[in-house]
Amino acid sequence: MDNQPIALITGATSGIGEATARILAKNHNLILCGRREERLAKLAEELETSVTTLSFDVRERKAVFESIESLPSEWKEIDVLVNNAGNAHGLDLINEGNPDDWDAMMDINVKGLLYVSKAIIPGMVARKRGHIVNISSLAGLEVYPKGNVYCASKHAVDALTKGMRLDLNAHGIKVTSVNPGLVETEFSEVRFKGDKEKAKSVYQGFTPLTAHDVAETIEFVLSRPDHVLIGDVLMLAKAQASSTIVNKNSQ
Ligand code: NDP
Ligand code: 8X3
């Protein structure tokens, strides 16, 4: 393992996390996290940098701490944390929503992000350096019909990003939030519980962002000179003006 910065990416098994791993592999050693171990192993094999993998469910507080604690000493000095793991579960009116979906979104998107951050931030504080990139969403800045709990979870991520930035300022740690609009990944398949047709229809009639587009922005944010902190980035497909205004006749 060479002397490059170490980046830990959650949700590296697909979408934005996987694309971020592919781009950051150019100049980082990588700790890739996710539940699907076989995908982590395959990605690790493909990347031309030092990679180690950790498989845990971000909802399992004990597993998060034990897993990150289990890193060999040469992997423990994490410079970059990309808090990306997360999903929407369901798209329902508030009076029709499934509390299991609500639990999943709050437990993964909010509490999972907190557990991973808590496992890593003390080391950054001790070293007086580090950069945390939280993947929030346009849904963290706006609310759309039936988005209720997913939007609440991402509004929480937005608040946590701002809170982290305040509390970690004295320790020389940068905190950034990247807020994408519609990105075509496995996101809608998860939201619609494996219904591929329904998932596909979300992105029909316009050109959505790709995971690679978002990963390029994450790379940009991370590669600024040390004295520059990009606080928040909102990035949209050209066809998207807001959560509810998408020009679906633009393709
Ligand atoms: P994907 O479904 O493609 O990726 C989600 C990732 O999160 C997977 O790697 C998955 O890994 C991981 N993950 C989900 N649940 C858990 C869990 N309980 N424990 C550990 N890891 C978990 O979606 P995206 O790449 O699109 O989503 C990545 C992030 O971007 C999310 O936070 C999402 O909210 C956000 N986002 C997405 C947008 C979009 O339109 N796609 C727009 C704005 C923000 P595994 O299943 O292997 O555990
Ligand atoms: C994901 C984008 O519009 O489905 O955060 O909420 S959206």
Image (cartoon, rainbow, N blue to C red):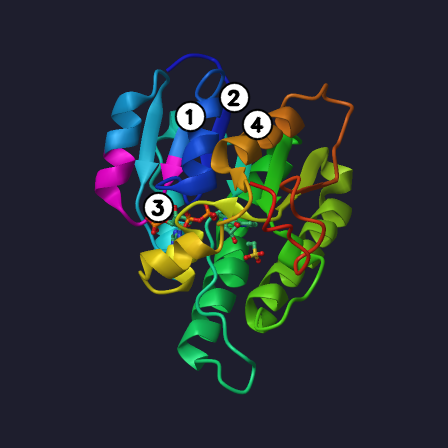
| Residue corresponding to mark 1 | 22
Q: Which residues are magenta?
A: 32-41
- Report the residue that reaches farthest toward the top: 2
Between circles 2 and 1, the one closer to the viewer is 1
Q: Secondary structure at mark 2?
A: loop
Q: Can residue 62 be seen in the rendering of this structure?
A: no
**Spatial CA span between label 4 and label 3:** 21 Å
Tell me if mark 4 has few (under 14), some (14-19) or many (20+) residues whose alpha carbon lies within 10 angstroms of its own: some
Graded by Cα atoms within 10 Å as few (under 14), some (14 to 19) or many (20 or more), the crowding at tag 3 reads many
Q: Which mark is residue 130?
A: none
The kind of residue tagged 1 is Arg
Q: Which residue is mark 4?
A: 216
Q: In the rendered structure, are the residues bearing label 3 and label 1 in contact, judged by CB atoms less than 8 Å apart?
A: no
Q: Disc 2 versus disc 4: distance between alpha carbons?
A: 17 Å
Q: Amino acid at mark 4?
A: Glu
Q: Is residue 110 left or right of residue 138?
A: left
Q: Earlier in the sequence, mark 3 or mark 1?
A: 1
Residue position for label 2: 5
User: Could you tell me which quadrant the N terminus lies in?
Assistant: top left
Q: Is the residue under label 4 in contact with that under label 2 (CB below 8 Å)?
A: no
Q: Residue at x 27, y 47 (%)?
A: 36
Image point (64%, 25%), residue name: 220
